[in-house]
Amino acid sequence: MKKLTFSMSLVLIITLTGCTGKMNSDLNNNNIIPRPRSVTSTSDYFSLNKKVIILVPKQDELLKNIGRYLTQELAFFPGTEAMLRTTKSLFPKQTIELIIDSTGTIKDKEAYKLKIDKRKISLSASSAEGIFRGIQSLRQLIILNSREVGSGSLGIPTGEITDYPEFEYRGVMLDVARHFFGMEDIKRYIELVSLYKINVLHLHLSDDQGWRIEIKSWPKLTEVGSLTQVGGGKGGFYSQDEYNEIVKYAADRFITIIPEIDMPGHINAALASYPELNCDNKTTELYTGTRVGFSNLCTVNEITYKFIDDVIAELALMTPGPYIHIGGDESHATALKDYIPFINRVQDIIASHGKTMIGWDEISHAGLKSGSVVQYWGSEENAKRGIAKGAKLILSPASKCYLDMQYDSSSVMGLNWAGYIEVYTAYTWSPVDLFNGLSRENIIGIESPLWTETVETMDNIEYMVFPRLIGHAEIGWSDPEPPDWEEYKNRLGKHSILLDMLDIDFYRSPFVNWE
Ligand code: ACM
């Protein structure tokens, strides 16, 4: 079944819930996730179901785009007629004004201030990115807090929200190699996570089971290497045009795409496509199982580095963001004496194309350049070695962040090698407390990977991701210290309204008080 859009479902939900809700004139009870940093309430209402002007600066195309996006969201709100304007109305109307504040008082580019008065909402930030993050709070506020405020009118509570992120990097990773997911699914995933202020989508574009990105200089990678997936399904790949469309769709939501080509291991799909990447100069068979650690590039052949240079060159041209991820994990078929010079050389290739390397924590064995980032997933020792070499970390502890882990022993999908991760477990941890010797300045942020050995459809993705990702999003943005599960679980429970509205097939944990 085709999923309802946010706006289509808005009509249904507001009709169902808005008019029956308890009066809430207190902005402090706003239920926004991630929880905003500071909220003050002025105990009145901004009425919504009337004409609402969205006011944006005339010269600012980015803000006009965001204004259009908000107009579309509000257009379906019952009784609300939202209009985009670049000049103030002569007659006062309900207005939502988007403002770039260039006074220097809003320091972080994602920070925003949302001031809600009876007649006017002012959303200000130092950049369009901050405005976009603020709009996500406003979207949640409207859905979760609109209440009947007299004579059939719906309103949201007045007051002021000041908000900014703790971590600059708040990511999700999707493995499109074990199972391939098409354009519609990727766009939907981007749209869903944007509601929770996620700002990075890391795409795991290659593995033993499939190569998923067109590389024009090595066409067999997709002609051969993309043809299957775990379980023997037909696989697939993104053409460069499609990939550029994903990058643009994400950028419109201020989400950066980080492409990953996993090497020197997890590489069978490439080895099956080109014999010269194998030390014995023979192609391997395509692989549809789930074993790890058996494949490797021939690190001692020069052609391997020509291959990597060509692939990275094409990827770099499609990557506006600063990073390219080279995997580097579970390279059990490559001896450490070969692994270290290999990673060093790949790091140089990435730098020669103007990008910065990210790799899973095993890359800390190599000599890390300034700026290179280590993604901690399992080994404290690797992470500490990375820190000692001056690298910053992305935190993806498997026992907290791996969205492919089962919720409990009754889960039918997912794996459990890192343990079961109930919604409670995903929320109740603090980045700096993960291991001794880790401190705030070592961390650029957190990321929630979804490996897809057992995940085959968009519904499967939604079930594994939601609601655990919402807790990770709060840790990354608000850094609750310490996380208060009893408070959070009530706030999360209210989000079933939003999740249902977006037709998200989420896991209804029995430990959450769902609305
Ligand atoms: C990993 O889970 N192999 C990064």
Image (tube, helix red, strand yellow):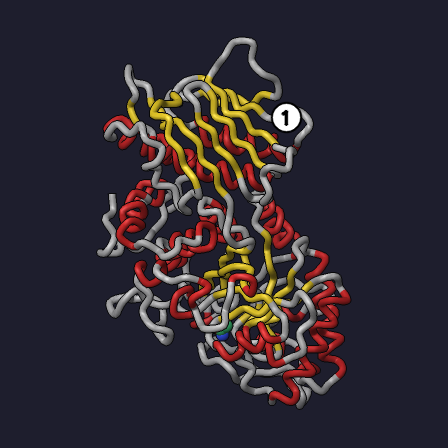
**Is 266 on the left or on the right of 315, as rendered?**
left
- Any part of residue 144 in sight: yes
- Amino acid type, residue under disc 1 in the picture: Pro
Residue located at (36% from left, 30% from top)? 11
Estimate the x, y position of residue 338 in percent, counting from the top left: 66, 87
**Is 209 on the left or on the right of 510, as rendered?**
right
Residue receiving disc 1: 57
Q: Nearer the viewer, residue 401 or 311?
A: 401
Above or below, comparing residue 202 to residue 17 in the picture: below
Q: Nearer the viewer, residue 162 or 34?
A: 162
Q: Quadrant of the C terminus?
A: top left
Residue located at (51% from left, 44% from top)? 164
Estimate the x, y position of residue 124 in percent, counting from the top left: 55, 32
Residue located at (45% from left, 44% from top)? 195
- Any part of residue 2 in sight: no
Q: Nearer the viewer, residue 263 or 339?
A: 339
Crowding around mark 1 (Cα neighbors within 10 Å: few <14, some 14 to 19, many 20+) is some
